[in-house]
Amino acid sequence: MPKEPSKDEQIGFHKGALSTLAKERQEFVRILQIVEQLMKVHIKSLQDLGVDLTKQEKLEEMADEKRN
């Protein structure tokens, strides 16, 4: 029967997991910021080209409602 890890081992495991997850979260936020910046660039370009994105969004919502 396997021996249960000591309290110190359990604490070390959980601290390590939290450290890793915190770094992953930071990277996720960084990637999300890049995606947001790229989306803003594309939105501005579409608006400059005369595309009404609010109208497009409403049309897509209406189409989704019809499918459901």
Image (cartoon, rainbow, N blue to C red):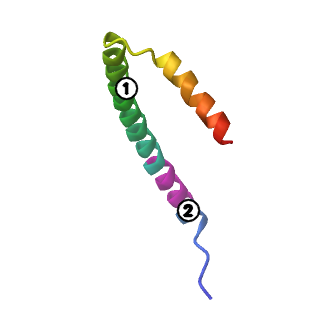
Q: Main secondary structure of the magenta part?
A: helix
Q: Within 10 angstroms of label 1, few (less than 14), some, or many (20 or more) residues?
A: few
Q: Position of residue 57 (x, y in %)?
A: 53, 24
Q: Residue at x 30, y 17 (%)?
A: 45
Residue matched to label 2: 8
When the figure is inspected, residue 16 is found, relative to residue 47, above or below; the finding is below
Q: Position of residue 50 (x, y in %)?
A: 36, 11
User: Which quarter of the image is occupied by the C terminus?
Assistant: top right
Q: Residue 47's image quarter? A: top left
Between marks 2 and 1 in the image, the one whose residue lies nearer the viewer? 1
Q: Position of residue 18 (x, y in %)?
A: 51, 49
User: Which quarter of the image is occupied by the N terminus?
Assistant: bottom right
Q: Is residue 54 left or right of residue 44?
A: right
Q: Nearer the viewer, residue 29 or 55?
A: 55
Amino acid type assigned to the residue bearing label 1 in the image:
Met
Q: Residue at x 42, y 40 (%)?
A: 28
Label placed on residue 15: none
Q: Is residue 50 left or right of residue 12?
A: left
| Magenta stretch, residue numbers | 11-19
Q: Nearer the viewer, residue 36 or 46?
A: 46
Badge 2 marks a residue whose secondary structure is helix
Residue placed farthest to the bottom in the image? Answer: 1
Q: Pointer 2 and pointer 1: residues touching (CB < 8 Å)?
A: no
Sooner in the amino-acid sequence: mark 2 or mark 1: 2
Residue matched to label 1: 39
Marks 2 and 1 sit apart, C-alpha to C-alpha, by 46 Å
When the figure is inspected, residue 19 is found, relative to residue 6, above or below; the finding is above
Q: Within 10 angstroms of label 2, few (less than 14), some, or many (20 or more) residues?
A: few
Q: Residue 66's image quarter? A: top right
